């Protein structure tokens, strides 16, 4: 459980009813909600976007704020003309807003990095590898503990830079479904590797099941062993109250990474929020302009200031401003209101999905049993995930995601292919062949989704189940290893919707 009272330094705006009204007013304020596509039955329909776990749609109110800010555009790192001074100040404020959103105290820094969590976790895996110390007996702290539910971004960087990575299993709920990380197994792993344990890396929320992990409790367990705690907040930041601080200093998260494109700000940078001490005594992973005090042909001096020394080069100012404006909007509405709203929609969706014949849900899906966000994964009996996803798109205009969601060990384990350690069998090259590429269908919600979207999806899935043979007869599998399927008669070319060069010519001709 994440404690809402510790979640932000951004003061919610107005009374609870007023904040709920503002959230309702924002539902239609996103780019792409009115986008229409031709369907396989010859009609045209607006899309229903249910792929927010991959990327959120862009909040137009924040976009408008950025456009106003960019009237003053100039590069940063100067105070001697108005535009540069304004941009520099706004860029500093963008860092401060991000820090306020996650309640980061003064001994933490906010670093913009790459385009998502992947860049931040890779950066911090390298930083932490350099920071490894030795225990009194000379044993190197080179073990990282993570979980079976991790996205590849919170697994592979540690495998590359740590000496050993230990994957902890998950709890089973009363229905036998996968829940949060197994806290007893985690404690045992920490105890076993305490002398060598460097840090525990855990996702706040699974991108496969939507189940929430108790990150502050995990941080305390890691700190009790003299280790650090790294949290992947890619799936949680837009959905739940989140703080790097817990109830006590022992519950603080040492490193937290977020993806702007999953917080209604596609085009914005990824974010690292970390203790400043972790960067002490290290040269930045990337060097260049803007981070040095002195350079000649024989040596250079890196500045001490954070985050400046970790952000070489020209910053992504529009992206940083977009992220800050979006987080400020979410904070002013209140993440408590946003969490409550999504929980109600998720409950409604789970109840409706469970009434569909032949639909199997993955992961703990009773909200009275497991805390979770609006991420729902499933399969339909005897229908490949790629086929179901294609039908939803081609016939109903419903955009969902399929395959393994960059969490292959977890998905294969949920499907019964991998063993308890997440290891796939030797014959997986056959089991996971092109026609039977393992995977699931994933529905995931954003602020713009409503019960009407759920109803539309349930009606579509019910129709697919009732007419499975008819739908299957109009598709063929792509034998490219993707598990995707294509319609035998209907096709859609991206160039039918948008051609950049043509848009350039059209707009130039109108000048």
Image: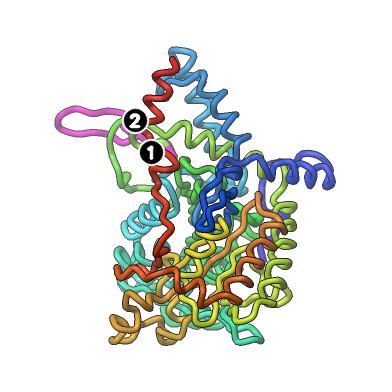
Query: Which span of residues is magenta-colored?
Result: 291-307
Q: Please, is residue 156 above or below residue 78 in the view?
A: below
Q: Residues within 10 Å of mark 2 (few under 14, many from 20)?
A: some
Q: Nearer the viewer, residue 287 or 423?
A: 423
Q: Is residue 303 on the magenta stretch?
A: yes
Mark 1 touches mark 2? (CB < 8 Å) = yes
Answer yes or no: is residue 340 visible: yes
In the rendered image, the quadrant that contains the N terminus is: bottom right
**Residue neighbourhood size for the residue with mark 1, other residues' Cα within 10 Å, grouped as few (<14), some (14–19), many (≥20):** many
Q: Residue 504: horizontal and vertical position, in percent?
A: 38, 27
Provide residue 144's location: percent of width, then percent of height: 40, 70
Which residue is rendered at x = 53% and y = 79% of the image? Answer: 170
- Distance CA(mark 1)–CA(mark 2): 8 Å
Residue at image mark 1: 311
Is residue 424 magenta-colored? no
**Secondary structure type for disc 1:** loop
Identify whether 447 is placed above or below 201.
above
Q: For this rendering, which residue is in front, 432 or 366?
A: 432
Residue 175, placed above or below residue 166: below
Q: Can you give x and y, in whole percent of width and height, for residue 353 in the image?
A: 66, 72
Say which residue label 2 marks.
Answer: 290
Up the image or down, 243 lies above or below 486; here it is: above
Res. 400 mark: none
Residue at the outermost top position: 81
In the displayed structure, does residue 375 sit left or right of residue 12?
left
Q: Nearer the viewer, residue 227 or 42?
A: 42
């Amino acid at each position: 459980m994440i404690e809402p009272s510790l979640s932000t330094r951004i003061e919610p705006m107005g009374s609870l009813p007023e904040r709920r009204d503002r959230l309702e007013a924002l539902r239609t304020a996103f780019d792409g909600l009115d986008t229409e596509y031709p369907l396989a039955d010859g009609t045209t329909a607006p899309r229903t976007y249910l792929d927010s776990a991959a990327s959120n749609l862009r909040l137009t109110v924040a976009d408008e704020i950025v456009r106003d800010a960019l009237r003053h555009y100039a590069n940063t790192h100067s105070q001697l003309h108005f535009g540069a001074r304004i941009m520099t100040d706004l860029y500093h404020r963008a860092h401060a807003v991000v820090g306020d959103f996650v309640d980061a105290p003064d001994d933490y820094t906010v670093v913009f990095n790459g385009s998502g969590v992947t860049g931040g976790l890779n950066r911090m895996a390298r930083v932490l590898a350099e920071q490894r110390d030795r225990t009194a007996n000379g044993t190197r702290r080179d073990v990282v503990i993570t979980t079976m539910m991790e996205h590849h971004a919170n697994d592979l960087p540690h495998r590359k830079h740590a000496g050993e990575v230990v994957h902890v299993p998950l709890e089973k709920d009363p229905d036998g479904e996968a829940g949060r990380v197994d806290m007893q197994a985690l404690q045992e792993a920490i105890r076993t590797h305490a002398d060598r344990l460097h840090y525990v890396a855990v996702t706040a929320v699974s991108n496969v099941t939507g189940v929430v992990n108790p990150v502050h409790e995990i941080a305390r367990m890691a700190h009790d062993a003299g280790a650090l705690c790294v949290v992947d907040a890619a799936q949680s930041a837009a959905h739940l109250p989140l703080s790097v601080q817990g109830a006590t200093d022992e519950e603080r998260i040492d490193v937290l990474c977020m993806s702007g494109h999953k917080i209604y700000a596609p085009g914005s940078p990824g974010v690292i929020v970390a203790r400043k001490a972790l960067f002490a005594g290290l040269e930045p992973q990337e060097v260049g302009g803007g981070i040095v005090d002195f350079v000649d042909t024989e040596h250079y001096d890196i500045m001490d200031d954070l985050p400046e020394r970790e952000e070489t080069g020209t910053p992504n100012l529009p992206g940083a401003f977009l992220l800050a404006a979006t987080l400020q909007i979410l904070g002013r509405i209140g993440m408590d209101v946003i969490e409550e709203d999504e929980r109600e929609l998720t409950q409604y969706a789970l109840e409706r999905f469970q009434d569909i014949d032949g639909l199997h849900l993955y992961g703990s899906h009773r909200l009275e049993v497991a805390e979770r966000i609006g991420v729902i994964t499933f399969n339909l009996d005897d229908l490949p995930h790629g086929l179901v996803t294609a039908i939803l798109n081609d016939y109903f205009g419903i955009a969902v995601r399929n395959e393994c969601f960059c969490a292959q060990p977890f998905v294969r384990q949920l499907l019964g292919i991998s063993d308890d350690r997440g290891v796939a069998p030797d014959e997986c090259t056959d089991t996971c062949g092109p026609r039977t590429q393992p995977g699931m269908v994933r529905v995931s919600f954003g602020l713009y989704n409503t019960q009407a979207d759920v109803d539309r999806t349930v009606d579509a899935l019910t129709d697919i189940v009732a007419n499975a043979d008819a739908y299957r007869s109009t598709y063929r599998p792509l034998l490219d290893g993707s598990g995707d399927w294509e319609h035998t008669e209907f096709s859609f070319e991206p160039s039918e919707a948008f051609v950049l060069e043509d848009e350039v010519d059209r707009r130039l001709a109108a000048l």
